[in-house]
Amino acid sequence: MPGQQIELNPVDFITVGTIGPKGQRIFHLQGGQGKQLVSLIIEKEQAWALSEAIGEMLDDLDKRYPPAEPSVEPASVDMDLREPIEPLFRVAQMGLGYDEDRDMVVLVAQEAIVVDEETDPDLIEPGVVRMWCSRGQMRLLSRHALDVVKAGRPDPKQNGRLIYYWT
């Protein structure tokens, strides 16, 4: 649905997960607040880049704005995707922001728009989802997203791309 704006402020949970067998996995970014559940399709590379960006951002925030209290991560957090998994849209790009007054990180995901030759791309508004999270939630998301990416096929020759190897 182009132009849809959703704000989960704050999220109760946020996670990355996959559906499908290795080599055919579909990556999802999912967050929820109360009864509202938002699932988005992302690429494997986006999951990896998100993990890296969150890690860098949190390291910087911890130096610039040390937390008032040391964060205590729970022993176990359910990082599985929640049902029903009905993707709202495929993500074109994501961004991270920080609200210093609330000590909250926002993840902004923008919809990928496919236009045909007859449609003026300037007239189409992409959907946007904003998920507001604590530093602890983002740290868990970063670690989990990296684990999900690494859970794929271990042999890079099988990652769906044609790679030439000379011996």
Image (cartoon, grey):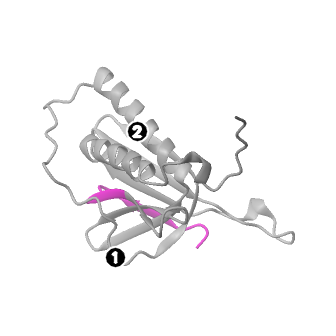
Q: Secondary structure at mark 2?
A: helix
Quarter the N terminus occupies: bottom right
The tag on residue 121 is: none
Q: Nearer the viewer, residue 118 or 45?
A: 45
Q: Nearer the viewer, residue 114 or 5?
A: 114
According to the picture, the residue beneath numbered tag 1 turns out to be 83
**Where on the picture, by quarter, is residue 114?**
bottom right
In the image, residue 11 lies in the stretch drawn in magenta: yes
In the image, residue 3 lies in the stretch drawn in magenta: yes
Disc with the residue nearer the chain's start (1 vs 2): 2
Q: Nearer the viewer, residue 25 or 114?
A: 25
Residue furthest to the top in view is 63
**Where on the picture, by quarter, is residue 19?**
bottom left
Point out residue 81 in the picture as x, y percentages from the top left corner: 34, 66
Is residue 102 shown above or below 125? above
Residue shown at the point (38%, 55%) measured from the top left = 131
